[in-house]
Image (tube, rainbow, N blue to C red):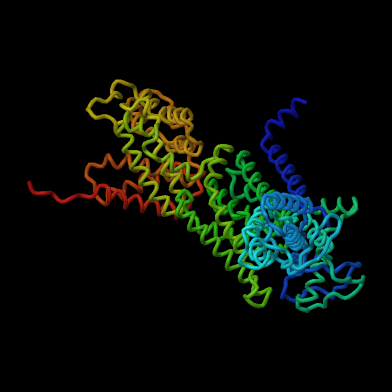
Amino acid sequence: MKKIINKLLVNHSLIYKLFLYVITIILVVYLFPKGGQFKYEFQKGKPWQYENYYAPFDFSIKKSNQEIETEKLQIKETSKQFFEYNEEVVLNVKKKISEKISEFLDTSNVSDQNQLLQKSEEILNEIYEYGYLDPLSEQKVKNLEITLRRGNSIEDIQPNKLFKATQISVFLNTKLGMQPFSDEEKNVLTIISNELKPNVTFDENFTKKAYEQNLSKISYTKGLVAEKERIILKGDIVEGEKLIKLNSLKSEFDSQVWSKSNSNWIIFGYSLLVALSFLMLMLFLRKYRQDIFENNNKVTFIFFNIILVILLITMIVKYDAKFIYAAPIVILPLVLKAFFDSRLGLFAHTLTVLLLGFIVPNSFEFVFLQIVAGIVTILTISELYKRANLFLSVLQITFVYFVAYFAFSIIQEGNAQNLNFEKLTYFAMNGAATLFVLPLIYIFEKLFGLVSDESLKELSNTNSKLLRDLAEKAPGTFQHSLQVANLAEACANEIQANSMLVRTGALYHDIGKIKNPMYFTENQATNVNPHNELTPTDSAKIIIDHIINGVEMARKNHIPDRIVDFIRTHHGTTLVYYFFKKEEMSGNVFAESNFHYPGPIPFSKETAILMMCDSVEAASKSIKEPSSQAFDDLVEKIVNKQMDDGQFMNADITFKELETIKKVLKKKLKNIYHLRIEYPE
């Protein structure tokens, strides 16, 4: 049992990766559709490349979206509009008007009272025969015929039979009698005008129910294809009726609910394909990105992002598949490039898009567009922390989407007249959403403890707390660090390494000297050298301890591990040569290991560049008579010595790149120490 536990502890990293691998496969397969799938790929306007195809079973021919939308629009235009006739309003109005006219006539000396009462009653009956339309409901009238609902009875009438507010005044003036009106007639006219109330209003609920009822009657099919009926011949162009039948059959397959036996086989097939895809990713990491493969946190981060993209597309497809092009999938290669490199970003993006082909409709078009967009993303964005670069890259990605979609559209339609401009809007939304990558990178940095170029930019600010302390307590070391940073950045640019990373690492590589600044020559403003009072072994220990002190200070100030690596490796396992020789000349017995830096040796191009630049810059200060040849010899001597000592054995750097770095160092040193003309006194 103890042996098993020990074995598990020794292989815990591999076991975790296996667990992550299995869990990822289960999650992705769970997100995949479980229905049937049409096994043939076809595109509008392209020849049918398979054998003659016959219907495998009876199925209905489905109407196109355009046909259904046309029917819906027609129903909307022809659907009845219901207006409600309020009988209670009519009774109240008639009662009030009758009472007020009677009251007025009783106080006047009018001889023909009955005639005025009869005339007013006739007017009201005529107005309310079909009704007085509420002014707010007038704008609702759109049809040439409306339906008037009186209690449980309905009647179809023309809208002009209803009285409107603008017609009332003219109607009263023409119906009351001959003009000029008498005072009594005017008073009756005023009473009627004041008391009239609209009694017909638009019945929105009833109209909506009628419209929805008509919509529910729409048939989404327009015919039937019998089993073994020929659908298309080999070589026929996929268009017209053939395309409609194939799309209907594909939809039928996609909507089929398989039996438990079939469903298990489908899940098994999906599992194999997903397992194969993620296995390719793991093998890629193991072969080409060993440092990432060994870091479980980074592997988890990569898998997490892939699952996130698949989850996003799955949710969009379930909601409405037409929005898939609004999803900013290119964020995946952007994020991976920000934290790792472009090659890994493109590889992971391609695998993810291929997996998404199982989920999305028109998978070939989707896969082609997204892979091209991913390639453009990787090629166009060089320095993500520069917002202008990101904005320009997003514009280029969106433009590529437009061009690729335009090409697909004219291939499928045969012309450019039927472009779906709604899709272009989705591509624009995609580009806008891609700009969200910057806050997303910040979130990932906090969640996974990774470092992006944006963070490096912040760390390289010389006003940061640690660098300010270095400038105040060890000004000579600070100036040395600035010179090394400039040299390292120039070298990194020449060999396509991460210049921002190496510059930031160079600024922090000597922060351990803050603890004992006067024991380092660059900080000794006077001729007093404290090493004169120490033995070579003690002096070497103080010099070597600046590595350990630097790591401790970096950890305390929450400096990322990627920067701490530069502190640990910038001297590798080299000798503290001056004190080693001094001890050797003394004739005392000593252990050579006391004069070696603890290491490790550089394990990347960037850390190797820093080692060379640090040594060359420090040694250049010792040249008494600077000359072009002296600098050339110095660079060759130092870099060759480091190579002979095996300091670059673990760094992924070539001889060609080393020669390029030497040339840059020689040129930069000559520029730094160039002579100026002597000005006259």
- Residue 278 is at least partly visible in this image: no
At x 51% / y 48%, what residue is drawn? Answer: 652
Question: Residue 343: image x %, image y %?
Answer: 57, 54
Please indicate whether residue 542 sits to the left or right of residue 146 in the image. Answer: left
Residue at (87% x, 71% y) in the render: 223
- Image coords of residue 461 (percent x, y): 39, 40
Q: Residue at x 69, y 61 (%)?
A: 140
Compared with 147, 385 (above or below) is: above
Residue 266 in which image quadrant: bottom right
| Quadrant in which the N terminus appears | top right
Above or below, 545 relative to 278: above
Residue at the top extreme, as displayed: 533
> In this image, 414 relative to 67: left or right?
left
Report the number of numbered marks: 0
298 left or right of 512? right
- Residue 290 horizontal/vertical position (percent): 59, 45
Residue 493: tell me if it is visible: yes
Picture quarter containing residue 41?
Answer: bottom right
**Closer to the camera in the image, 422 or 10:** 422
Which residue is more in the foreground, 61 or 347? 61
Residue farthest to the left, as pictured: 681
| Above or below 599: residue 415 | below
Where residue 307 sits: x, y (%)?
A: 68, 47
Q: Quadrant of residue 26?
A: top right
